[in-house]
Amino acid sequence: MTLSERRCAGRRAESRRRLRRLSIPSRCEPCKKGGNGYDAGKQIKGRKRHLAVDTMGLLLVVVVHCAGIQDYHGAKLVMMKLLGRFPRLSLLWADGGYDKGGLSDWIGRFAGWILQIVPKLDGQKGFVVLPRRWVVERTFAWLGKFRRLSKDFEEREQSSEAWIRIAMIHIMVRRLAASPCT
């Protein structure tokens, strides 16, 4: 139909053609609806989790994104969520993966915080407990005990973040229940 024929027939000027979905074999469908990438440096496929925790290891902010985003770019997403929520926050500790891309300068300009990098020990091979770094590693270990978080089962990044928050609520409630009433 031409444009004038469509108008005379009382139809819209542009046609609304519906596209048929092609049937895709299940092996070709992406398993995740959210971001799903690959980090060649860490050899991680899927997603990365960034946590901001306090000195006791309790969750302040969580960000989950595809693994294709570098750690220092993911840290900027964490800082944007932290800004304005914790007024006493002034010092942040991070591992060497966050010491790239001018992140410490960006954080200083963005929020006035100090980013202190906890460097690896010279000649270090494998995992070694580093000062202040163990706090967030312990939090990741706590989260790994929850079956739903032991692997990346969630389709969307938001639901993965929500399950991390639920697990931390569970941890905090159990601590409160175990403490004696005063």
Image (tube, helix red, strand yellow):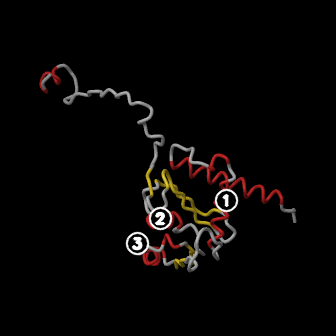
Q: Which residue is mark 3?
A: 101
Q: Earlier in the sequence, mark 1 or mark 3?
A: 3
Q: Secondary structure at mark 2?
A: helix
Q: Position of residue 54 (x, y in %)?
A: 64, 69
In depth, the one of 2 and 76 nearer the eye is 76
Quarter holding residue 50: bottom right
Q: Residue furthest top?
A: 9
Mark 1 → mark 2, Cα distance in angstroms = 19 Å
Image x and y of residue 99, in percent: 47, 74
Reading the image, the residue beneath label 2 is 71
Q: Residue at x 62, y 50 (%)?
A: 149
- Amino acid type shown at disc 2: Asp
Q: Residue at x 69, y 53 (%)?
A: 145
Residue drawn at point x = 64 percent, y = 72 percent: 128
Q: As shown in the figure, which amino acid type bears the numbered disc 3?
A: Gly
Helix, strand or loop at label 3? It is loop
Mark 3 to mark 2 CA distance (whole Å):
10 Å
Q: Is residue 90 visible?
A: no
Whichever of callouts 3 and 2 sits on the residue coming sooner in the sequence is 2
Q: Residues within 10 Å of mark 3 (few under 14, many from 20)?
A: few
Q: Report the residue marked by disc 1.
A: 141
Q: Quadrant of residue 144?
A: bottom right
Q: Between residue 107 and residue 48, name the one nearer to us.
A: 48
Confirm whether residue 71 shows in the render. Answer: yes
Report crowding for label 2: few under 14, some 14 to 19, many 20 or more residues within 10 A (C-alpha).
Answer: many
Q: Quadrant of residue 18?
A: top left
Compute the Cα span from label 1 to label 3. 28 Å
Residue at 58 percent across and 71 percent down: it is 125
Q: As drawn, is 147 to the left or to the right of 23?
A: right
Q: Could you tell me if the residues under marks 3 and 2 are in contact, i.e. CB atoms within 8 Å?
A: no
